[in-house]
Image (cartoon, grey):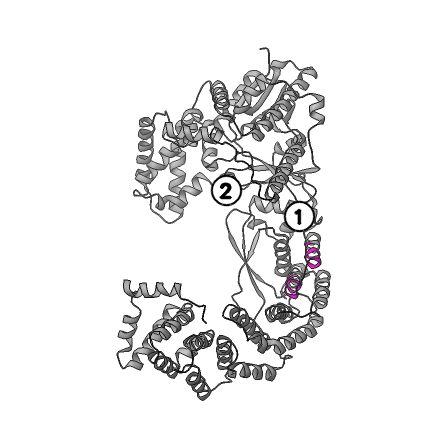
Amino acid sequence: MGGPVLFGVRHLSPAAAFHLRRALDAHQPELVLVEGPSDLNDQMKWLCHPETQFPAAILAYTQTPPVRTILYPFAEYSPEIQAILWAHEHQVPCRFMDLPSSVFLAFQTAEAERALESQEADGEEEPEEDRSNTTEAVYRRLEELTGQDHDTFWERHFEQLEEDYQAAANTFGRELRASVADVPRSAAETLVREAFMKRCIQEGVEGGISPEKIFCVCGAFHVAGLEENAPMTDGELAALPAVESAVTLMPYSYYRLSTRSGYGAGNRAPAYFELLWEAMNGKGLVQAPYLYLTRLAAAHRKAGNLVSAAEVIEGVRLAQVLAGMRGSRYPVLADLRDAAVTTMGHGHFSELALAAADTEIGTRIGSLPEGVSRTSIQEDFYRQLKALRLEKFRTAQTQRLELDLREKLNVKSEQAALMDLRRSFFLHRLRVLGVHFGQLLPSRQEGANWGEYWDLRWTPEAEIEIVESALLGDTVEGAAAFALKERGEESTSIAQAASIFEDAFLCGMPEAAAHALAVLQSLSVDAAALADVAETASRLSLVVRYGDLRRFNAAPVVPLVKQLYLRACFTLEDACICDVQAAPAVIRAMDQLNLLQLSHEFLEEDRWLELLAEVSDRDDLNTRCSGFAMAILLERGKADEGLLAREVARRLSPGVPADLGAGWFEGLAGKNRYALIARLSLWRHLDDYLSTLDDEAFRRALVFLRRAFSDFTPSEKNDIAENLGEIWGVNPQQAAELLMNDTTEVEQAVLDSLSDFDFDDI
């Protein structure tokens, strides 16, 4: 009875939590100390709040950029949480006893700076540390000796202990500690942490509490250190580094808890471990197989599969037999899964994969009471989530949200009338901040802009990203405005500035948009590549095409769109004097400019059509660009059959180098493929042209034609094959079947040889 009670635990262990509460009942301590940052004590009241639902996590973060964070996640079955709850229920003082989070963050910052310096050192490589005797190495060796992974080993030998758990866990931690010689920095941090914990114990004694009435909950690895090491002195405490930091409590998820996080606190099956906790506090572990297999069967049925009661009963019996064969009193997760695969999955785990994920990992997300300590931007986020009726989307499962941005005229309030537009602004602001709560999907509309489609899914990472945004502003809108302003100050091209302007427009932030437009206008004075001009004009066009749908005055944008359109028209021909590598960017710009002109009546159509005709006709330009210009003219109905026949005859003639002719056809095939497929004369010209080529020229042409047809769908290729059958005078369907067959080994070898084609002389 001469010292404090040291109860070693494994983080997120149901058995540790269960036996810990029994030990607390037996010892009736006057002070409970829990491993955790000592500057987080004010968060305990929220952890004990009746409206708090686990999992939850304490997040500590630096208040200066770059933001660094440390997470301390808890589940209901965490031994630390059960110790805190026990102390709260019995009105016993409870405190965290590990180093302050500000110190941990200082360690993290120093480590990052050291790694950066090592990378920047000229030719210097940091010597690799010997990791052959670390904790991870010992676990691997244990797996080799036992033939089972460490989680299964722990569950079989520790989670099922009914007596002497404390002694067994402490012994395991002590033996593990004796077996490892961790890397120097990690070992040094461990010693510093344990010295600080010992100091907290000493402070409790100096406060008038008998040592034997102090109950310490820590990782089993630290028990020996707390028994043997000396407390931290005042001088050592003063020498600890620290950074300015803040703390918040946040909801967590079982999905995130299922992976190793932070200091290795994760476990692989949170929902299953919650099930064990439920069984331990009910009829005992004998109940666990029934709970697991019935829930697995229910999840499997929910997915549309048939599972009988007999299969569940047989699964329980088989799991019990497997447990006996493998040396444990009760089945563990590995036994239960093997039994389920045999009785319900017909020998294939793939049949049960979805049900197993639901039963073992789960989709639970914690929640916190109103008023919990949060950053101001978190408060704003949750306030808007509620006001915009998006709370139901704060789940671990992806949900689709379809927005209609048009004003609803059949409602009374303006807020309700513009609800979807306000939702759009909110989601776009989060996107600008890099908060991955919503993913914008491509529009399914043609010729209309009122529909917007999102996939929404909440993750703890999204919460962390919100907290990190606190450095930019107190609200989501304020932080997004600052982020856009920073991007504007760093812009060096009109395309970058146009991207910022578009984001500000989509966020419903006219002041930020005006600032971005001013930056864009100043940058547009300088020369810019055609691709940048076309990209910028396309982004600005989006703003104009929306009209007043997003409550934005687009009038100042129109003159700039006209200016960029004219500049692109003046530079297009010169841009088409390019090589094979540059041609795709020019073609994309041509496509954007064509859509731009079609979208706005205030842009001169005649100028654009004359320019396309010139590019199509010239022989000194990149032939792929010329072919694409002809494709646009055909699509717009400005080129007749006669013109196309003349161009085909001219471009695909024996006197034209094969790569130039095939490149022109590749450009022609870049748009309106069905219209091309319907023109039988085109395929007759192509067939005649290829028939005149010698072997070497044919190989050159094949390189380009193979690339041209690579994006064609199987249906389009089948239609082309039928055209060729008609040209060759054979049954079109039979020709299509023959041409669409898989390539032979000889044919594939020929195609593979094209990968080594020498382009140096092109």
Q: Which residue is mark 2?
A: 255
Assign a secondary structure to mark 2. Answer: helix
Magenta segment, prevailing SS (helix, strand or loop): helix
Magenta stretch, residue numbers: 483-499
Q: Quadrant of the N terminus?
A: top right
Assign a secondary structure to mark 1. Answer: helix
Q: Residue at x 59, y 10 (%)?
A: 2
Single out the mark in the foreground, 2 or 1: 1
Mark 2 Cα-neighbour bin, 10 Å: few <14, some 14–19, many ≥20: many
Residue 547's spot in the image, x, y percent?
65, 71
Q: Which residue is mark 1?
A: 469
Residue type pointed to by label 2: Tyr
Residue 538 is tagged as none
Residue 344's spot in the image, x, y percent?
32, 41
Single out the residue that lies furthest toward the top: 1
State the CA–CA distance, disc 2 to disc 1.
23 Å
- Whether residue 24 is visible, yes or no, is no
Q: Give the answer, above or below, for where 85 lies relative to 525.
A: above
383, 640: nearer the viewer: 640
Residue type pointed to by label 1: Ser
Quarter occupied by residue 752: bottom left
Quarter occupied by residue 506: bottom right
Quarter occupied by residue 68: top right
